[in-house]
Image (cartoon, grey):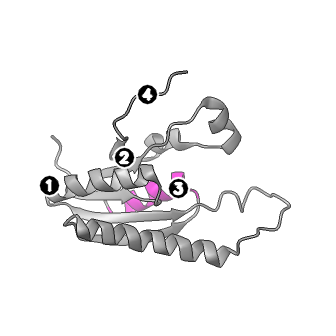
Amino acid sequence: MASYRRILLCYNGTHEGRCALRLGAHLARELHAETHLLAVLDDTEWTRGLDVVFPVPIQLERDTAEDVLREGVDKLAQLGVVAQGHLATGNPMTKIPSFASALNIDLIVVGHHRSGMLSRWWTGQDDGWLLDRVTCSVLVAMEQHEPQTR
């Protein structure tokens, strides 16, 4: 197994994010790795040029993202892992590689939510691009359950 000295856990408070957090904590503890936790406040909806007034103030969204980050750092501490928390604003597909590069990360751990092609197209998901933008290993954490039939 490769030597993973620095691990970046990506956390957004979702079920899939909690799965990635648990798996990443286990790995970090076993490998005695320097651990970083990244929460990204995704602003892609704000920057798409939509002519709408957002019902939720941007500061409230930032406060929520900070709460999610604190929650993640606290959960890691409960699992025996000390992590440095980072909060970024922007597209996760550019922020994750940027932080991974700046922190000299060996392994990124992310969660994955299954969705169909139409859903990916409609929401503009570009999560497949992450692998093309990083220079380290990526572990995709998924819950163990029956795959959805098509």
The answer to whether 58 is drawn above or below residue 30 in the figure is below
Please state which amino acid type lies under the numbered disc 2.
Answer: Thr
The crowd level at tag 4 (other Cα within 10 Å; few <14, some 14-19, many 20+) is few
Please state which amino acid type lies under the numbered disc 1.
Answer: Leu
Q: Earlier in the sequence, mark 2 or mark 4?
A: 2
As measured in the structure, the alpha-carbon distance from the residue carrying label 1 to the one carrying label 3 is 26 Å
Please state which amino acid type lies under the numbered disc 4.
Answer: Pro
Q: Are marks 1 and 3 in contact (CB under 8 Å)?
A: no
As measured in the structure, the alpha-carbon distance from the residue carrying label 4 to the one carrying label 1 is 30 Å
Q: Are marks 1 and 2 in contact (CB under 8 Å)?
A: no
Give me the disc on residue 31.
1
Is 100 within the magenta? yes
> Residue 130: image x %, image y %?
47, 45
Is 99 within the magenta? yes
Q: Which residues are magenta?
A: 91-103
Please state which amino acid type lies under the numbered disc 3.
Answer: Pro
Q: Secondary structure at mark 4?
A: loop
In front: mark 4 or mark 3? Answer: 4
Residue sitting at 67 percent across and 36 percent down? Answer: 121
> Residue 16: image x %, image y %?
43, 49
Q: Secondary structure at mark 2?
A: loop
In front: mark 4 or mark 1? Answer: 4
Give me the disc on residue 135.
2
Q: Earlier in the sequence, mark 1 or mark 2?
A: 1
Residue sitting at 37 percent across and 67 percent down? Answer: 72
The crowd level at tag 1 (other Cα within 10 Å; few <14, some 14-19, many 20+) is some
Is 107 left, or right, of 123 in this rendering?
left
Q: Earlier in the sequence, mark 4 or mark 3?
A: 3
